């Protein structure tokens, strides 16, 4: 079915050809007109199929791999019903969002902007790093995919995650943490960047050391929301400053060690994004997630809020994200008001 969802973008200009123009009194196209439209559609669809056959990989991503401006020009060449600029833009965006990444599965998910360290003496981690930094592998970027595990099934990874850049500056070799072993660990310091969804089953790299996955970057993907959801999302976003202030006041009543760690978290994530910033609702929701679920566990394993990061990454639109952010803040406030910082 994924194949047909991808093909749907190619059908948009032709579906409108069978619909009456606004204000038109005509009830249907003539037989000759329908024949002409169908012939034009078949010609264009054949061109699209030829483009997909030229793809080097046999997968559900065929439409987007090796799909560039020359292919778009070919689709429009000589067609009576040409792709509109909006259609071409959407196809190009779909193409650019499809990437293939090495992936790492961690015990917990992280959000865009959150940082963590990955440390291991296993040579497979170093092989993954070398693959990204040194080999001529044709990747579209120097990123890896970071995925957490399903909180309801610890044996299953999530199907969503974030990318993280891997460069020579954030990779180190340090003495092994294993006593009596004269070796070194690979330490990778990463920060979450772009959100993604897994498109297909991950596959083992030919080296046998790590997995690769076809993913779709979803940060700028068009999301569906009703007008009511848009209005509700804006109202919920306006509630955040007062809730955050109340939350901070309750945190200040906790132990000194908890207060200090929360101060460090707030320093690392910066101020709450302004309402006037681009994509402010999404950014404000993710900011709350980083606040109540910091990437490092608080002292003595204490938590300020139940784990919401997997759910935040899985949200389908900004209304769901901001609703979850407000709900998590209120839940944390209710718990902290009882005088404990452990859930």
Image (cartoon, helix red, strand yellow):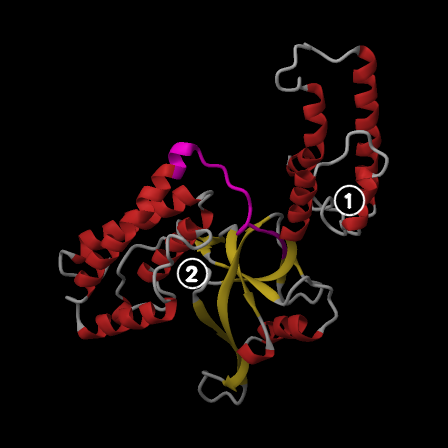
Query: Between tags 1 and 2, which lies in front?
Result: 1
| Residue at 50% from the left image edge and 54% from the top image edge | 157
- Counting the numbered discs, the total is 2
Location of the N terminus (image quadrant): top right
- Asked whether the beta carbons under mark 1 and mark 2 sit within 8 Å of each other, the answer is no
User: Can you say which quadrant of the picture contains the C terminus?
Assistant: bottom left
Q: Secondary structure at mark 2?
A: loop
For the record, the magenta segment spans 213-230
Q: Can you tell which mark lies on residue 171?
A: none
* Vertical arrangement, residue 300 with respect to residue 343, above or below: below
Q: Which mark is residue 72?
A: 1
Q: Residue at x 34, y 38 (%)?
A: 232
Query: At which x and y percent is residue 104?
Result: 54, 63
Residue bearing the label numbered 2:
108
Mark 1 element type: helix
Task: Give 241 or 202, whichever is nearer the viewer.
Answer: 241
């Amino acid at each position: 079915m994924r194949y047909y969802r991808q093909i749907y973008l190619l059908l948009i200009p032709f579906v409108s050809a069978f619909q009456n123009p606004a204000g038109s009194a005509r009830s249907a196209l003539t037989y000759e007109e329908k024949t002409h439209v169908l012939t034009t559609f078949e010609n264009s669809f054949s061109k699209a199929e030829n483009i997909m056959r030229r793809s080097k990989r046999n997968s559900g991503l065929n439409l987007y791999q090796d799909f560039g401006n020359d292919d778009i020009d070919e689709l429009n060449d000589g067609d009576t019903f040409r792709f509109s600029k909006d259609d071409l833009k959407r196809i190009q965006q779909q193409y650019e969002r499809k990437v293939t990444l090495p992936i790492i599965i961690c015990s917990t998910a992280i959000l865009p902007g959150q940082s963590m360290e990955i440390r291991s003496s296993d040579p497979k981690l170093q092989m993954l790093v070398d693959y990204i930094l040194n080999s001529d592998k044709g990747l579209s970027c120097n990123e890896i995919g970071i995925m957490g595990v399903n909180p309801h099934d610890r044996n299953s990874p999530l199907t969503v995650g974030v990318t993280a850049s891997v460069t020579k500056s954030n990779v180190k070799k340090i003495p092994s943490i294993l006593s009596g072993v004269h070796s070194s660990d690979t330490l990778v310091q990463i920060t979450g960047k772009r959100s993604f969804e897994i498109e297909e089953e991950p596959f083992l790299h030919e080296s046998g050391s790590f997995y690769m996955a076809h993913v779709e970057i979803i940060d700028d993907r068009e999301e569906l929301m009703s007008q009511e959801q848009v209005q509700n999302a804006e109202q919920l976003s306006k509630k955040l400053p007062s809730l955050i202030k109340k939350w901070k006041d309750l945190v200040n009543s906790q132990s000194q060690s908890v207060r200090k760690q929360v101060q460090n978290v707030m320093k690392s994530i910066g101020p709450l994004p302004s309402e006037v910033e681009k994509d402010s609702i999404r950014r404000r929701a993710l900011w709350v997630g980083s606040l109540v679920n910091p990437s490092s566990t608080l002292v003595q394993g204490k938590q300020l809020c139940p784990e919401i990061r997997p759910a935040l990454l899985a949200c389908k639109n900004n209304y769901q994200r901001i609703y979850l952010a407000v709900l998590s803040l209120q839940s944390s406030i209710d718990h902290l008001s009882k005088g404990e910082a452990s859930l």
